[in-house]
Amino acid sequence: MPSADLTTPASPPAPAALFAALGDTTRLALIQRLSGGAGQSISRLGEGLPMSRQAIRKHLSVLEDAGLVGARASGREMLYALRREPIEQARACLDDIAQQWDVLLQRLKLEVEQKE
């Protein structure tokens, strides 16, 4: 589904909002279901989940607020799709943290080796 068809957040969400939205197992499961790329309705996303359509809609709303999913109307239904840009932003944030840790661990290793 082209991203032009999706609702777009007013401003890019902070990484903390992305991680908070992904911190719920149901929302993470919805993201996994949407990762195939095709837009899906609430009914389809809820197949096999032990919750109401209203509960799924609330989870999708959190994901929308975090910029992780977008929606477009298709007849009487809304189709939800994953927005990859925020996922890439979160990944870049984690990569930066990992790189900082690598640098710190390398410094620690050098200090320990010098004292031996």
Image: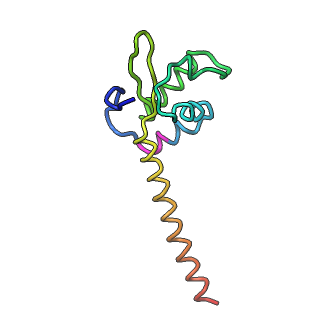
Q: Is residue 15 magenta?
A: yes
Quarter of the image that includes the C terminus: bottom right
Q: In this view, does 73 lie to the left or right of 48?
A: left
Residue drawn at x 44%, y 53% is 92
The span shown in magenta is 14-18
State the residue lying farthest toward the top: 76
Q: In which quarter of the image is residue 96?
A: bottom left
Q: Is residue 42 magenta?
A: no
Q: Which of 91 and 81 is in front in this view?
A: 81
How many marks overall? Answer: 0
Image vertical order of residue 45 relative to residue 77, above or below: below
Q: Residue 11: x percent and y percent? A: 32, 37
Q: Is residue 52 left or right of residue 72?
A: right
Residue drawn at x 54%, y 75% is 106
Image vertical order of residue 29 relative to residue 106, above or below: above
Residue drawn at x 58%, y 39% is 23
Q: Residue 43: x percent and y percent? A: 56, 16
Q: Nearer the viewer, residue 67 or 1?
A: 1
Residue drawn at x 41%, y 34% is 67
Q: Nearer the viewer, residue 105 or 71?
A: 71
Q: Residue 80: x percent and y percent? A: 46, 25
- What scheme was used to colour the molecule? rainbow
Q: Residue 47: x percent and y percent? A: 62, 20
* Secondary structure character of the magenta stretch overall: helix
Quarter of the image that includes the N terminus: top left
